[in-house]
């Protein structure tokens, strides 16, 4: 009985390890979102009623524009030159949160760098001049450490740009074409396959180890069982075959090809093509 319990515990522990390594989704702290807004406050800049009030503001602007208006705070300590690529990957890798048409204001509290990223239809509205206007409007609040009002100003300017329409003569040098790696694309489109590709060897080792331990425990349980007192089937039974007939079993199988789509939830497939204000 004790050995049985040990084997069950070992198997359970192996299962827990497999589940831990199979977790591939990025989780945000203090996150609230729907198709019109997202607020993720990992840096804990918006406490209590400030968080709720900002959520309502972003949602109002999101419903007005039809875009998802996002404010993301982190403590990732990303350097100025890496802000664009790093936080665009955050967007790509978390499409269960982010929508295709999205305007995203990122505050990296650890590094003191900020950036604005646009995706989808919103890109056309954010020309180079408007990106500069947005940064100029936010800087007074950012300089004084007032991240809450900076976020409100971000929302107001986004709605202003939408109401003014797409400029007929604006430039879009801030537009960045897709640079998504094969691994990033696989992670976005099929997280299970990505995990198997990256951690399959480790899962295999864990499975082999768990299987070996389980087999060893069970072999130990039965290996030394005595044979005394067992029933001798050969000596105490007889069999006379009166009739024999061969019965053939037939088995047929069918196969269906299942096509895997590229949808990753939260508004369709992701893309690394985007507009960027550059860090500031």
Image (cartoon, rainbow, N blue to C red):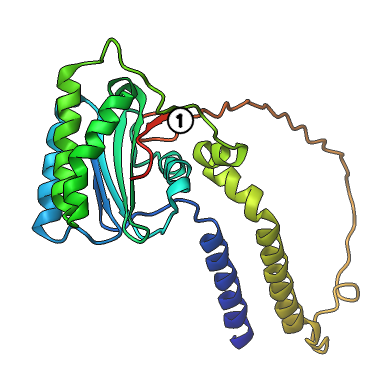
Residue at 12% x, 34% y is 60
Q: Nearer the viewer, residue 222 or 151?
A: 151
Which residue is at the far top? Answer: 168
Residue at 25% x, 15% y is 166
x then y, percent, for residue 64: 14, 26
**The quadrant where residue 58 appears:** top left
**The quadrant where residue 71 appears:** top left
Q: Quarter of the image containing the N terminus? A: bottom right
Estimate how packed mark 1 is, as few (under 14), some (14 to 19) or many (20 or more) residues with alpha carbons within 10 Å. Answer: some
Q: Is 129 above or below relative to 241?
A: above
Image check: 68 left or right of 115? Answer: left
What residue does disc 1 label? 263
Image check: 186 left or right of 103? Answer: right
Q: Nearer the viewer, residue 258 or 57?
A: 57
x then y, percent, for residue 223: 80, 82
Is residue 87 at all visible to an observer of this figure?
Answer: yes
Q: Nearer the viewer, residue 153 or 264?
A: 153
Image check: 87 left or right of 257? Answer: left
Residue at 55% x, 46% y is 192
x then y, percent, for residue 260: 55, 29
Is residue 34 at all visible to an observer of this figure?
Answer: no
Q: Is 215 above or below relative to 190?
A: below
**The quadrant where residue 119 appears:** top left
x then y, percent, for residue 16: 53, 67
């Amino acid at each position: 009985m004790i050995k049985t319990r040990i084997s069950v515990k070992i198997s359970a522990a192996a299962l827990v390890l497999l589940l831990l390594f199979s977790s591939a989704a990025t989780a945000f702290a203090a996150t609230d979102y729907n198709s019109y807004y997202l607020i993720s406050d990992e840096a804990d800049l918006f406490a209590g009623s400030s968080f709720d009030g900002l959520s309502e503001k972003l949602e109002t602007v999101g419903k007005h524009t039809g875009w998802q208006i996002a404010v993301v705070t982190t403590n990732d300590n990303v350097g100025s030159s890496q802000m664009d690529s790093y936080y665009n990957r955050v967007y790509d890798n978390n499409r269960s949160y982010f929508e295709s048409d999205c305007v995203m204001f990122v505050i990296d509290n650890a590094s003191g760098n900020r950036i604005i990223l646009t995706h989808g239809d919103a890109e056309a509205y954010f020309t180079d001049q408007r990106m500069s206007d947005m940064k100029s409007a936010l800087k007074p609040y950012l300089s004084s450490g007032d991240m809450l009002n900076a976020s409100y100003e971000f929302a107001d300017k986004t709605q202003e740009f939408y109401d003014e329409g797409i400029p007929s003569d604006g430039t879009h040098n801030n537009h960045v074409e897709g640079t998504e790696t094969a691994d990033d694309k696989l992670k976005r489109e099929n997280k299970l396959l990505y995990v198997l590709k990256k951690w399959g060897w480790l899962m295999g080792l864990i499975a082999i180890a768990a299987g070996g331990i389980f087999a060893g425990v069970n072999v130990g349980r039965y290996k030394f069982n005595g044979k005394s007192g067992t029933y001798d089937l050969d000596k105490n039974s007889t069999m006379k075959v009166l009739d024999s007939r061969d019965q053939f079993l037939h088995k047929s199988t069918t196969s269906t090809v299942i096509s895997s789509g590229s949808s990753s939830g939260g508004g369709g497939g992701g893309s690394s093509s985007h507009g960027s204000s550059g860090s500031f």
